[in-house]
Amino acid sequence: MIERLTTQAIDLLKQLIETPSFSSEEEQTAQHIEAWFRLQDIPYKRQKNNVWATNKFFDETKPSLLLNSHHDTVKPNNGYSKDPFKTIIEDGKLFGLGSNDAGGCLVALMATFAYFYSRKNLKYNLVLVASAEEESSGQNGLNSMLDIVPKIDVAIVGEPTLMQLAIAEKGLVVFDAKVKGTPSHAAHPNNDNAIYNTIAVLQWFQNYKFERKSPVLGDVKMTVTQINAGKQHNAIPAEVDLVIDVRVNDKYTNAEIEAILKKNAPCTSIRARSLRLNSSSIPLNHELVKAGIAIGRTTYGSPTLSDQAVLTCPSLKLGPGDSTRSHTADEFIYINEIEEGIQIYIELLEMVL
């Protein structure tokens, strides 16, 4: 059964790669996922471009374990030497946009779900969500499903982790800030040049350290990623716009980060775009983590964001592939990583379910 499910999972991944599915444009990949459920004779539901199902013997008195990954992708960058929408297999590598992030994870979780689908007397219900709009943190992704699917008590989120246990994940807050000055003609003296005023502000952001360090996720990381000012060479602008990317560890809430920057940052103004993408974690003594360690998996903290950010329950990030390949040119996943991923998912859940 595992061999058949693995073959069908890899076939589905090939279909997903060859079907463009940029965030909010996942209609056709959702159709492929629906067809896969029909192939397995598993009833499913679709909400916009999210496809979901529960195990055959779902029991409302039991807690529910979410298996989730996404089928949307970023747009391919200009560095591709291969067709990003063509499945190419070379030296055991399966190339294609979304192969590593996170198609391999998704199809491996779907195969795992199918493996346990008809089993009776599970300790947990299983809820599978193949979600949309993860890459864009869109409004019609996993976050929109949490009031539709049964209440989730714990989750495995499929992202490429080399099948190691990401027991914590940094949150994200993006800030828009302004540094103001006095606008004037460039030919005249000006001791309140907004661009020059920005130098000290940039140095403050570069040097500022948040006090609380996480043993799993390390320090909060704050980075100025965009700067914009001026429209013509002979006019000093009235203000400079900055964008600041803050990766938040599990020792702070996003609201706390916002309060600290509003109080201390030497900007004219600073505003968070959203506070909903919080850090996430699962206790080391949770049975999912203990089961993973028992089968030889290691634990670590992940600096990258995933759909874990929209969950309020404990969640574990785990999946085949390597995060360093995500969003790179000529993205790929090894075939044997998918095969191993399905085996490890099943072995892990056998100990928990």
Image (spheres, helix red, strand yellow):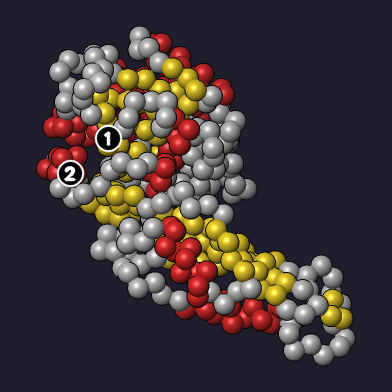
Judging by the rendered image, the residue that carries numbered circle 1 is 153
On-image quarter of the C terminus: top left
> Is any atom of residue 223 visible in this view?
yes
Label drawn at residue 286 = 2
Left or right, residue 289 beside residue 71: left
Q: Position of residue 15 (x, y in %)?
A: 49, 23
Q: Which class describes the residues within 10 Å of circle 1: few (<14), some (14-19), or many (20+)?
A: some
Q: Quadrant of residue 189?
A: bottom right
The x and y percentages for residue 166 are 29, 49
Total number of numbered discs in the rendering: 2
Q: Give SS at disc 1.
A: loop
Element at label 2:
loop
The amino acid pointed to by label 1 is Asp
Give the camera-side residue of 109 and 84. Answer: 109
Residue 100 in the figure: left or right of residue 4: right
Asked if 156 appears above or below 350 in the picture, the reply is below
Quadrant that contains the N terminus: top left
